[in-house]
Every structure is written in structure tokens, then in C-alpha cells.
Amino acid sequence: MATEIEETLARELSEVADGVLVPPMPSLTSADEPRRVVRPWQPLLAAAVVALVVGVVAVLVGRNGGGEPEPAPSPSPSVTDPAVPVTAPTVPYVIDNRLYVDGTQVPGEWWGLETRHGVWLATQFDGSWWWGGPGIEGAVRIEAQIDQGPAISPNGLYIALVDLSSGEARLTGFDTQPAGEGFGEAPIPDLPAREDGVALRVAAVTDEGDVIVQGTRTRLMWRAQFEDQRTVIDLTESAPDQVVLGATPAGLVVVDGGDGATDATSTAPYLATIDGDGRLTPGATLPTYDVLDLSPGGTWLVRAPAGTVAGEVTAVGALSAQAVGSDDEVVLEAPEGWGFAVSTWTWEDEKTLVATLVSDGQGGAARLVRCDVRRADCVAFPVPATE
């Protein structure tokens, strides 16, 4: 009996030891820094041995009717959480005023990049605006005089803008698909270019192609993809005092302007949906912010908290992230000696985002950083080699 137990135990220990998966080394702040050697397999192997001994005892106690031990179940494979990768970004990015798309540098000096589902929108230092995307060859210039930047829909299908090239304000836009067409001009007579010294701007474009344009007094929604494109809703009547700040995969970001608020730095905004008649249905409340961006599926948000990027601030040492609808917040810290360049962070998927790093004075080559919001971990890496 003792010999049988010993043989069974020895055989099963050998099989489990062969099947134990050794997890990867834990990531450090920078991919270039030396790594400390650790041996995570030791507690795993010890745990496997304990589990196996218990399993063998159970096998011997629970013999089948023929007097032979029932076979022990195969050990379950270990589940490991991979480290934050340092591979090339999967989304367009700008670093040192250079724009990279699909591993290729796009000619020009760039800044102000936005990207949605592979479609990107950016401006050059001469004030011109350009865009590109899947099925689109190269960078395409937007032939318009633009004061305030265009807006792109969360699904990347539409871009809308206020064009001043004719001497008057014209609300227009276009479909970003390879065979897409322009919106034409919104039927809004006497659309002001500025109100109280503030330029009119496109606050949001929805995934359905509805365009929301706002000034200090004007708040309109043009249903650019609805029927004959002639429907315009006055939001001052359908949603009085509500100021739309942008469109996200989880809905519009709106702030109650009843007390004069025009941004989300002091008044908490909220998510909302909007119907064809311009009526808002409120959803989750959001935290205040200076800069906000939601993940492609609308499940996570990352923000520069209110008051952190005011004035001449070019970088922040930390960002805040949380699941949409949750109050549980995680802090994403930039690697020591570096800061997140303002407004350069871009989501790659539902858990990771990439950003440009700015040195705090130590110098060194430009770097990128990738953060995993679920791990609350950020890893810096050099700019990948490009074509």
C-alpha cells in the first residue's frame, strides 16, 4: 500500500512540475532599466505540491468498485497577468511634432492629434487641418478656414466644422469612409462666426451624424444625416441651460450651465443621450476635469483633474482613471523624471493608452509610455523604429 502511494505521488509530482507555467517577470517603470531577478515559480510549485498531495489522498480514499484508484484530474494551468507591453503603438501618435501612422512618419510638423477607430484628425503649425484613416491614401487636407478645431464622431465616421473661408460662418462636414461624401451646408441663415468675442465651434458630432454647434448664446443641432438634411433643432428650447462639451462612446458629455458654467472644471458634468428632437436623457455623473477621454468602448475614462493643466502647464506627473459610473479611482503615475505631455494620451483599447513623455529637465531622447488602467501601471519605452 505504501509503495503504491509513493509511486502515485512521485508520478503526479513530476507531471505537475512539468505543467507549471512560469509567469513573466514583473514590469518596472522603464523598459530600459535593469530588472531585479525574482522567482515567482517557487510559491506556485509549493502550492501545486500541496494541492497534489490532497488530491492523491482523495484518490486513495475514493477507490472505485474494482479496487483500483480513480485517475486524478489534470492540474489546471496557471493564469498569469502579462506585463504592460512595450511594442509600437497601435494608434496614430505625435512625438516631437512628428506624426506617425501605421509605423510611417507623415510629412509635416504636427500637434493636436485626435484619433477614433483608426481615423485621425490633426493640425499643422501653419494652422491647416488634415485627416486620414483606413482606406484613405496619405493625409488629406481639409480645404476650409477654421478658427476652432473640427470635431470627430466617437465611431470615427464623421468630421464636422465651421468654415469661415467665404467670409461667413458655414456649418459643414463629411463622411470619412473611402466612398464618403460631404454634408453640404447646414440650412442656418445668419450663423454668427463669433458671439461676445468667442468663436462658434462644433461641440460634438454623434455616431448618427448629428452635429451640435455652440457659441455663448447659440446652441443648435443639425441633423446632417437625417432625410433631406434640412432639420435643425434649437437646443436652447429642447435642453435649456445645458452645454454640450463633447461626444464620447458612452454618450454626450454635458454640463448644466444654469449657474454660468461653460466647462467641467468646477461643475460636475454628466453623460447623456440625445434624441431626434434634441431632448437629453441624463446618465452617469462624471468627475470634474481639465482634459477627459473615454476608452473606445466607453467603459473607462482617463482625465487630468480640474486645475492641473491650467495656464502654461505642458505636462502632468499623474493622470486619474476610473471605470465609467464608478467612484473608485486609480492613479497613473508617469515614470520618475518624466511627465505626461498634455493632451497626448490616446486609448488603444479598453485597458491601455499611450502618451508622449516630457522630461522634467534631465534631458534625453523623446519617449513614449503605455499605461494599463486595470494594473495601474505605466511603462516607458523608446520611439519605435519607423519606415
Image: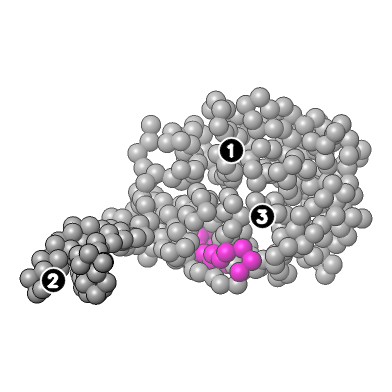
The stretch in magenta equals 306-326
Q: Is residue 325 left or right of residue 97?
A: right
Disc 3 designates what residue? 250
Q: Is residue 337 visible?
A: no
Query: Which of the two residues, 359 or 6, is positioned nearer the viewer here?
Result: 6
Residue ID for mark 1: 119
Q: Which residue ends up furthest to the left in the rendered image? A: 3
Which numbered disc flags the more N-terminal residue, 2 or 3?
2
Q: Amino acid at mark 2?
A: Ile
Residue 383 picture location, percent across and down: 37, 45
Disc 2 and disc 3: Cα gap in Å?
59 Å
Is 85 covered by the magenta stretch? no
Q: Amino acid at mark 3?
A: Ala
Among numbered discs 1 and 2, the one appearing first in the sequence: 2
Q: Is residue 136 above or below residue 9?
A: above
Task: Say if residue 159 shows up in the picture.
Answer: yes
Residue 340 position within the rendered picture, expressed as x and y whole percent measured from the top left: 48, 58
* 227 left or right, relative to 146: right
Q: Which residue is mark 2?
A: 5
Majority SS type along the magenta span: loop
| Observer-nearest of 236 and 67 | 67
Whole-number angstrom distance, CA of label 1 to CA of label 3: 18 Å
Question: Residue shown at 50%/69% (left/top)?
Answer: 330
Check the image and report above or below for 36 versus 181. below
SS at circle 1: strand
Q: Earlier in the sequence, mark 1 or mark 3?
A: 1
Q: Quadrant of the N terminus?
A: bottom left
Q: Quadrant of residue 125?
A: top right
